[in-house]
Image (tube, rainbow, N blue to C red):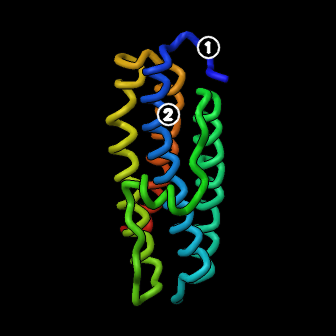
Amino acid sequence: MKANIGIKQESITKVAAVLTTVLADEFVLYTKTKKAHWNVEGPDFYNKHLFFEQQYETLDDIVDTVAERIRTLGHYAPGTLKEYLALTHLTEETREKNDSTGYIKELLADHESILIHLRENINNFAAELHDAGTSDYITGLLENHEKMAWMLRAHLK
């Protein structure tokens, strides 16, 4: 059943398409953060192990809310790894060394990439697609990523 929420179906479809890429990005970043949590090594292991855990728990909540936003708009959320890898702006990485600095730099770059993508869409959702709700939701998501990026960046000083 289509959502009758005062937004043209064409606009809802465009919003949902952008949100599916956001969901893919969030899931890939969640997975990469979980990998950092599992595999980090070095003298700061325990501290970074706990830090990455806090980060992936936040991302897990974000993944869920993005999928629910897509469903709220009457569309289905992608949910397979194949779909996520086809939709994401991020890349999978391979690393020879499992040090915290390497993981932090990579995760920071991914957060910043997501931030840019979110920022590019906030005004489009509200002004062109007439979906103030998703624009507001994306603004909140942006603030979460800004804080997470700040915390990652602080470890590099």
Q: Gap between marks 1 and 2, in whole Å? A: 14 Å
Q: Nearer the viewer, residue 72 or 26?
A: 72
Question: Could you tell me if the residues under marks 1 and 2 are in contact, i.e. CB atoms within 8 Å?
Answer: no
Q: Is residue 94 above or below residue 87?
A: below
Q: Nearer the viewer, residue 39 or 77?
A: 77
Q: Is residue 140 above or below residue 30?
A: above
Q: Is residue 5 above or below residue 100?
A: above
Q: Nearer the viewer, residue 17 or 42?
A: 17
Indicate the amino acid at tag 1. Answer: Asn
Image quarter of residue 149: bottom left
- 89 vs 7, left or right, is left
- Coordinates of residue 113 in the picture (x, y in percent): 35, 52
Image quarter of residue 52: bottom right
The crowding category of the residue bearing disc 1, from other C-alpha atoms within 10 Å (few below 14, some 14 to 19, many at least 20), is: few
Q: In the rendered structure, which disc, 1 or 2, sits on the residue that comes first in sequence? A: 1
Indicate the amino acid at tag 2. Answer: Ala
Number of disc labels:
2
Residue depicted at 54% across the width and 56% down the height: 27
Quarter that holds the C terminus: bottom left
- Coordinates of residue 84 in the picture (x, y in percent): 50, 57
- Coordinates of residue 13 in the picture (x, y in percent): 47, 28
Residue indicated by mark 1: 4
Q: Secondary structure at mark 2?
A: helix
Dot label at residue 16: 2
Quarter that holds the N terminus: top right
- Coordinates of residue 82 in the picture (x, y in percent): 51, 62
- 78 vs 121, left or right, is right
The crowding category of the residue bearing disc 2, from other C-alpha atoms within 10 Å (few below 14, some 14 to 19, many at least 20), is: many
